[in-house]
Amino acid sequence: YYVLSCSIYFFRVFLVTYIVTLAGNLLIIVLTLADPALHTPMYFFLRNLSFLEMCYTSVNVPKMLRNLLSGDKTISFIGCAMQTYFTFFLGGSECFLLVSMAYDRYVAICKPLHYPVVMNRKVSTGLAAGSWLSGLLMSFGHTSTIFILPFCRSEINHFFCDIPPLLKLACGDTSRNDMAVFIMASFFAIFPFMLILMSYVCIISTILRLPSRAGRRKSFSTCSSHLMVVTLFYGSACIMYLKPNSSYSPDTDKFLSLF
Ligand SMILES: *[C@@H]1O[C@H](CO)[C@@H](O)[C@H](O)[C@H]1NC(C)=O
């Protein structure tokens, strides 16, 4: 009885969160399309991020909701592989899209006179398309090296198929895969994170030098939400995929994934 009522409780929480996520992102897409004043690169990236977020949450949450409701906790091998693939595809794309968005704000605030030339339509669509493509390729390479491993156990201590808990199920030596996760995560998290950090150092020092208080507030407000998303996304991803294997803790991972 306890397990059942607990599942129903989580089902409601996740269902409401999921619906709010979809509705909020859909609203952003519709609004930025409907208002001609918002047909700028910044809102193009934002629309793309919203679309990406809708896909990303739809990879894991509907399956989780079904499992919570039915009490059946299983996922097929193919289903698990697909979930891992799409999680890393969309997560990797999000890394690069967030870098593109930081670059957009960097040029807009630090090089305002060059902005219309540097961030033209071709560049912004190219950056977005490049983000999607690099996530797709990275995930393909990564997922295929995981799923050719022999698996000895089948109980995943997580609420979706993610690489660290999956590696715990493989038999034999997974140190090379652990290394691959580390290298990939460094490339996909630390490198973009450094770029974002560098552009923010410049952005913030430029903003602080603005003469008017209203101008400072306006510039900060175009960056603060990006900064918040970046901190949540990269903070949890870095802790999850970059910490040493010896300190692996399923409960911490599950909690961080929620973010
Ligand atoms: C996101 O960017 C890609 C590549 O430029 C584009 O094809 C796609 O239509 C964009 N999606 C949205 C929802 O704007």
Image: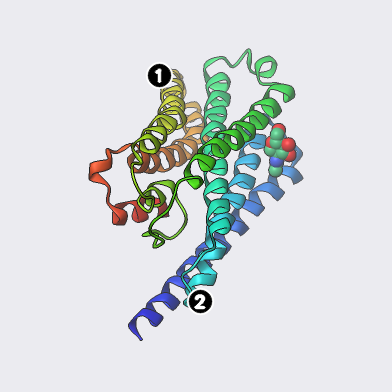
Colour convention: rainbow
Task: Point out the frontmost of discs 2 and 1.
Answer: 2
Q: Residue at x 39, y 50 (%)?
A: 170
Q: 96 or 250: which is nearer to us?
A: 250
Residue at which label 2 appears: 69
Q: Position of residue 167 (x, y in %)?
A: 39, 47
Disc 1 CB within 8 Å of nearest ligand 1 atom? no
Q: Is residue 37 visible?
A: no
Is tag 2's residue or tag 1's residue first in the polypeptide sequence? 2
Q: Across the whole image, how many numbered discs are drawn on residues? A: 2
Place of residue 178 in the rendered image (x, y in percent of width and height, measured from the top left) = 36, 38
* Point 52% across, 64% down: residue: 75
- Residue on which the image places disc 1: 205
Marks 2 and 1, how far apart at CA: 51 Å
Q: Amino acid at mark 2?
A: Leu
- Residue 65 point in image, percent of width and height: 52, 69
